[in-house]
């Protein structure tokens, strides 16, 4: 099961790092473009995606000059802790590593990622959706190659909706009214669960509500803009606070046994989800297969089409690679526009491609998911992807996510103001950034 959405604290960016960035500049790539010799160049790859071996085998069969050695280094903290340790030690890091978009700035700030722009990455810019490319690049510098994204949608129990005569909402106002209606017709159930323990989920909801928490790019160091307590964020949190406090929405922590049981038992009539969520549901709620359907994410106003991405990942090359040219080819070509590789990724891990060409492929668009009774759910997620706007992450996302989770959970427990909680987050993140040597602008 792919659990890239499970967020945990990871090593902090230090003031020393910022000093090295400012004084020393980019670290040189180790080894240069080494040649293969008598056999294929071996490239070590770390990733966490389920069913990845067939993708690796396909690449190796179609690239006789390169052989990928794949390691499942774990997800979230498991992989990133190993990576940070290896980068700091100067040895042990892979040639290519899979990173979440939100994590990329933290690793990039250490100056241990190869600029793929030197290996022709910019020539492929127009082949990827614009917002995803912007998350891996800064001007002509390209720090990773986009792989997948997490466009969002509403997953709902169509059998329960039909049994109670419920209508699928199209706006958040309708969704709130529906949540109250569900409590009346099914007192032991909820329309949904609010996963306040997942800071990335909270961020995605705020993003869809129009919030932009950071203004950041490596070329503008040490400056960073922080606006976590924006009116847009407060609007979104006030909305959910009212539903939670009124007992219309549950607050079981995401990715726990209680949460999974809720998906299986009918406790939750719907779920705010990303394109990768069905992978989890098919694993933990097998008994409900065929009972769910996918609809567009509710909007903050009639006729709106504003979207966000909850998760997503890219391939980066570390400066410990002795074969950066071949490693860059792996990052660029492991998926790219290769439909055979993508079929494996789509079928085994619900990967949502950032490649424009693959998004248009009949296999992707018309793919029928048994868990959803044969519905072509990619049609919903593909349309959602078209409405995703730009978003800039900070180099300390884990700290931000942990603070969002901690402060909102405290507000839930104390029945105190969620907007006050996000103001606290703003102060703590600003202080954290200042301590790390950033110049904060709001």
Image (spheres, grey):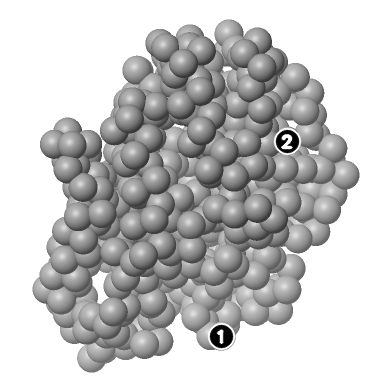
Disc 2 element? loop
Q: Is residue 26 visible?
A: yes
Task: Give residue 377's mark.
Answer: 2
Q: Is residue 90 above or below residue 75?
A: below
Determine crowd level at label 1: few under 14, some 14-19, many 20+ residues with C-alpha closer than 10 A.
few
Q: Nearer the viewer, residue 423 or 75?
A: 423
In the image, what residue occupies the spot 15% across and 63% down?
Answer: 428
Q: Nearer the viewer, residue 420 or 289?
A: 420
CA separation, marks 2 and 1? 35 Å
As drawn, which residue projects farthest toward the right?
362
Q: Total label count?
A: 2
110 vs 295, left or right, is left
In the image, what residue occupies the spot 25% across and 48% down?
Answer: 418
Name the image quarter holding the C terminus.
Answer: bottom left
430 vs 36, left or right, is left
As drawn, which residue projects farthest toward the bottom?
23
Task: Give residue 48's mark.
Answer: none
Residue identifier under label 1: 140
In the image, what residue occupies the spot 70% across and 23% down?
Answer: 372
Percent position of residue 78, x then y: 32, 42
Q: Earlier in the sequence, mark 2 or mark 1?
A: 1
Percent position of residue 51, x then y: 60, 33
Q: Nearer the viewer, residue 177 or 280?
A: 177
Instruction: Classify residue 420 by image quadrant.
Output: bottom left
Q: Is residue 146 above or below residue 158?
A: below
In the image, what residue occupies the spot 51% across and 56% down?
Answer: 208
Percent position of residue 168, x then y: 65, 31
Q: Nearer the viewer, residue 389 or 246?
A: 246
153 vs 339, left or right, is left
Tag nearer the camera, 2 or 1: 2
Instruction: Classify residue 354 by image quadrant.
Output: bottom right
Determine crowd level at label 2: few under 14, some 14-19, many 20+ residues with C-alpha closer than 10 A.
many
């Amino acid at each position: 099961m792919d659990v890239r959405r499970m967020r945990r604290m990871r090593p902090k960016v230090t003031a020393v790092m910022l000093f090295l960035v400012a004084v020393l500049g980019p670290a040189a790539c180790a080894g240069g473009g080494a040649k293969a010799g008598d056999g294929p160049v071996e490239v070590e790859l770390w990733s966490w995606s389920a069913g990845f071996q067939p993708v690796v085998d396909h690449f190796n069969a179609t690239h006789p000059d390169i052989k990928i050695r794949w390691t499942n280094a774990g997800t979230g903290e498991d992989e990133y802790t190993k990576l940070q340790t290896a980068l700091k030690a100067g040895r042990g890091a892979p040639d290519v590593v899979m990173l979440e978009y939100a994590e990329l700035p933290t690793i990039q700030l250490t100056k241990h990622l190869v600029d793929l722009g030197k290996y022709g990455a910019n020539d492929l810019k127009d082949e990827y959706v614009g917002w995803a490319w912007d998350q891996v690049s800064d001007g002509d510098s390209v720090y990773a190659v986009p792989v997948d994204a997490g466009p969002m949608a509403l997953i709902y129990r169509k059998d329960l909706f039909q049994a109670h005569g419920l209508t699928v909402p199209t706006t958040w106002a309708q969704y709130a009214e529906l949540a109250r209606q569900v409590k009346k017709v099914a007192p032991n159930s909820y329309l949904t669960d609010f996963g306040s323990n997942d800071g990335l989920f909270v961020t995605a909801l705020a993003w869809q509500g129009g919030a932009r928490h950071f203004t950041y790019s490596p070329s503008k160091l040490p400056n960073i803009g922080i606006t976590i307590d924006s009116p847009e964020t407060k609007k979104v949190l006030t909305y959910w606070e009212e539903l939670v406090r009124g007992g219309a929405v549950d607050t079981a922590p995401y990715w726990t046994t209680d949460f999974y049981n809720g998906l299986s038992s009918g406790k939750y009539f719907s779920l705010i989800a990303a394109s990768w969520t069905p992978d989890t549901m098919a694993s933990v709620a097998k008994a409900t297969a065929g009972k769910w359907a996918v609809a567009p994410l509710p909007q903050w106003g009639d006729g709106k089409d504003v979207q966000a991405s909850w998760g997503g990942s890219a391939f980066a090359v570390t400066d410990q690679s002795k074969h950066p040219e071949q490693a860059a080819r792996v990052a660029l070509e492991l998926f790219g526009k290769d439909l055979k590789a993508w079929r494996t990724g789509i079928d085994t891990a619900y990967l949502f491609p950032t490649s424009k060409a693959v998004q248009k492929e009949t296999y992707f668009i018309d793919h029928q998911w048994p868990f959803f009774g044969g519905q072509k759910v990619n049609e919903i997620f593909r349309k959602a992807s078209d409405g995703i706007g730009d978003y800039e992450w900070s180099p300390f996302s884990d700290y931000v996510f942990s603070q969002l989770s901690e402060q909102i959970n405290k507000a839930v427990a104390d029945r105190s103001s969620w907007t006050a909680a996000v103001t606290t987050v703003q102060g703590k993140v600003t202080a954290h950034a200042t301590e790390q040597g950033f110049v904060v602008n709001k």
